[in-house]
Image (cartoon, rainbow, N blue to C red):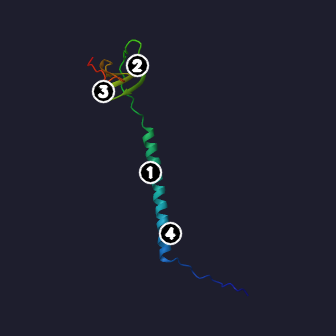
Amino acid sequence: MSDLPDEEPATTLPPDLRFLKILVTTLAAVMIVGLVAIVALLVIRLQQPNPLPQLPAAITLPEGAQAEAVTFARNYTVVVTDGGQVLVYDKAGQKVGDLTLGTEGGNSDGN
């Protein structure tokens, strides 16, 4: 003789709480799918080799200058020297221009 009923009545959630439960479950599923998509895209993109820039065979810097930074553009190689010069070379390694940093107006020539 127990005070507990043999069968528990079926508990149904109120409509607002049921909607919230469905919403949370759906949002969790969307986040999981999004995370899987991001990981898949990273794996696919990181497996492809990065194309290396085409470098000229040789670049001649001015006497006594040392390169501090080198940047590769589509058709040019840009070298910044320790003396504050910006030197622009074409794909063949020929100097096409320069600019001196730190002076008013700069200095540019087409050599």
Marks 3 and 1, how far apart at CA:
36 Å
Q: Position of residue 19 (x, y in %)?
A: 47, 71
Task: State which quadrant residue 89 falls in.
Answer: top left
On the image, numbered disc 3 is attached to which residue? 75
Between disc 4 and disc 2, whose residue precedes? 4
Discs 3/1, front = 3
Query: SS class of the residue under badge 4?
Result: helix
User: Is the residue 39 above or below the residue 46 in the image?
Assistant: below
Q: Amino acid at mark 2?
A: Gly
Q: Nearer the viewer, residue 12 or 80?
A: 80
- From the viewer's perspective, tell me whether residue 71 is left or right of residue 32: left
Which residue in the protein does label 4 denote?
21
The residue where tag 2 is placed is 83
In the image, farthest residue toward the bottom:
1
Viewer-closest of 78 and 15:
78
The residue depicted at 42 percent of the width and 20 percent of the height is: 82
Q: Amino acid at mark 4?
A: Lys
Foreground of the two, 19 or 109: 109
Three-letter amino acid code at disc 3?
Asn
Kindly identify the amino acid type of the residue bearing the numbered disc 1.
Ala
Q: Residue at x 39, y 31 (%)?
A: 51
Alpha carbons under labels 1 and 2: distance apart:
48 Å
- Residue 24 position, x and y percent, is 49, 65
Q: Residue 23, how many percent across, how many down?
A: 46, 67
Q: Secondary structure at mark 2?
A: loop
Crowding near the residue tagged with mark 2, few <14, some 14–19, many ≥20 C-alpha atoms within 10 Å: some
Q: Secondary structure at mark 1?
A: helix
Q: Gap in Å between the C-alphas at discs 4 and 3?
A: 58 Å
